[in-house]
Image: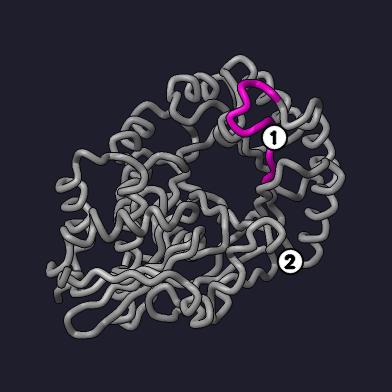
Amino acid sequence: MKLTKIETFTDPFVCFVRATAEDGAQGWGQVAPYNADITAAVLHRQVAPHVLGLDCGDVDFLADRVRDKEHKFPGAYLRRAIGGLDTALWDMAGKRAGKPVCALIGGTPGTLRAYASSMKRDITAEAERERFLRLRGDHGFDAFKFRIGAEVGHDTDEWPGRTEEIVPTIARALGDGAALLVDANSCYAPKKAIEVGRFLEDHGISHYEEPCPYWEFDQTREVREALDIDVTGGEQDCMLENWRLMVRDRVVDVLQPDICYLGGLSRSLRVARMAEAAGMPVTPHSANLSMVTLFTMHYLRAIGTPGKYLEFSIEGADYYPWQEGLFANDPYRVEDGTVRVTDDPGWGVEVSSDWLGKARYQVSDGRG
């Protein structure tokens, strides 16, 4: 069935994509958040011309065709744009089959353990502790991630002493029954990263994310080889060639693709197959409650080596005001620290008509 139309609905943070086939079948997807208006322009200018009129069912082929036709543009924006089309076509396929996307890729609906993921660095140890305890009481979370160091901080902290304070504070508050994860967001050179890693080990932290600049694979591998704690990373990487190197050289212990950054579900499944062949767990990056977390839920219910949990953002309107009011239904209810992939067709979500009515509309349909 031929792809006849690609529509985008965009605000500065979010761009939803609707794909339509010649028989009228439709599906919803999304590009990666942030500067979504730029990605929407890339989608219409550098993706749509190469895919309109082609078979909707061969998503891998379409992704590779765009890559090949736009080989002068190997970077993130093109992949983010491809991901918007890819995820819309998977939704269309699920709706045609009357099945959730996870069932189309070998999985089943069901629950996933979620970790409460904090995005905040401008938060004190005491305030972070209190909201983690509240979330554990309200929603049953038993795994939590918080931030250490400064983002791409060159060995500096968000403010002096914050990391040394927040790690033991959270560890004491949550106790032995909780899994504790930290994210350094490319903060440290290897020597400092190893020093911090040993401090984390001493306090029972089990997951050490992006300790070194993410593009410095040798530095990250040096840290991984020096520590017992799981060193994790990969969220920023959009090139499959980088993923092959990351897996081959065991740069990290746990792989963390972001489905929207990487270019959609089909490309993320290629990473999952690399991980399965190498026996490496996959705990994707899904740091907000737009559609990316829903894509990740379906993915984790189907891949061969899923990690222990789903990243689930705990930030509300104070931090992510743009994620409010996106959907007509709620795909993100947390009960006993778990979320559920339903058996609804496709992604199982409806975009809010009110939100769509306020968004900037663009269409590519091959008619100029």
Q: Residues within 10 Å of mark 2 (few under 14, many from 20)?
A: some
**Left/right of residue 176 with respect to residue 368 in the rendered view:** right
When asked about the image quadrant of residue 328, the answer is bottom right
**How far across and how far down the image is residue 218, in percent?**
44, 20
In front: 23, or 137? 23
Residue at the disc numbered 2:
139
The secondary element bearing badge 2 is classed as helix
The amino acid type of the residue labelled 1 equals Ile
The secondary element bearing badge 1 is classed as loop
When asked about the image quadrant of residue 311, the answer is bottom right
- Magenta stretch holds residue 153: yes
**Left/right of residue 363 with respect to residue 341 in the rendered view:** left
In front: 178, or 244? 244
Residue at the disc numbered 1:
148
The residue under the point 59% across, 67% down is: 339
**How far across and how far down the image is residue 145, in percent?**
67, 46
The residue under the point 45% across, 24% down is: 216
- Quadrant where the image shows the N terminus: bottom left
Span colored in magenta: 145-156
